[in-house]
């Protein structure tokens, strides 16, 4: 999970919120963690301080999709920062769910933000997705030709 913020098409900052309790490597343990995080009140703790979004107007929160939604740590992230006046462009990697509920979830957890159309990339295609991502960035004015 990561996010990128920019003041204009060029300047940006990138961060990877890290869970205070690391996600397990074991598949079954990961599935159990995912089940616990499906609770709408789950808020995994993020380790360390999150950077301020002051001075940035565009945010690209990027995560995978689990059971049609971003992991709940992304809700911890969005609820802990002030997104008023920002434009949020969700980016997801998925198996079958596309953007899932991210646009709706971010509309709820980022009050005062504009939620732009997101970009969903199939997990198997992530390593080859650079052209699609660059095209989306150009189309939205976040990257110049």
Image (cartoon, rainbow, N blue to C red):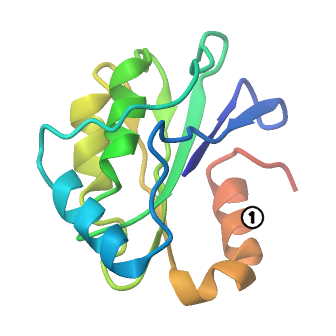
- List the single residue furthest toward the bottom: 124
The residue depicted at 64 percent of the width and 79 percent of the height is 126
Residue ID for mark 1 = 134
Residue 96 or residue 114, whichever sits in front: 96
> Residue 70 or 36: which is nearer the viewer?
36
Residue drawn where x is 12% and y is 44% of the image: 40
Q: Is residue 36 left or right of residue 91?
A: left
Image quarter where the C terminus lies is: bottom right
User: How many marks do you count on the picture?
Assistant: 1
Q: Secondary structure at mark 1?
A: helix
Q: Is residue 61 above or below residue 108?
A: below
Left or right: 135 in relation to 68: right
Left or right side of 22 for 73: left
Residue sitting at the far top: 54
Q: Where residue 92 sits: x, y (%)?
A: 47, 63
Q: Residue at x 58, y 22 (%)?
A: 48
- Location of residue 69 (image quadrant): bottom left
Q: Position of residue 119 (x, y in %)?
A: 50, 63
Q: Residue at x 78, y 32 (%)?
A: 12
* Crowdedness near tag 1: few (<14), some (14–19) or many (≥20) residues, C-alpha within 10 Å: some
């Amino acid at each position: 999970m990561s996010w990128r913020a920019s003041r204009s098409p060029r300047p940006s900052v990138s961060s990877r919120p890290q869970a205070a309790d690391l996600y397990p490597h074991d598949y079954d343990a990961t599935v159990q963690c995912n089940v616990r995080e499906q609770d709408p009140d789950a808020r995994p703790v993020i380790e360390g301080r999150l950077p301020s979004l002051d001075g940035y107007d565009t945010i690209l929160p990027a995560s995978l999709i689990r059971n049609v939604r971003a992991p709940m740590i992304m809700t911890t992230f969005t609820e802990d920062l002030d997104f008023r006046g920002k434009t949020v462009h969700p980016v997801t990697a998925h198996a079958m769910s596309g953007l899932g509920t991210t646009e709706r979830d971010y509309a709820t957890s980022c009050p005062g933000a504009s939620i732009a159309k997101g970009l969903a990339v199939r997990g198997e295609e992530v390593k080859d997705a650079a052209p699609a991502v660059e095209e989306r960035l150009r189309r939205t004015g976040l990257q110049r030709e």
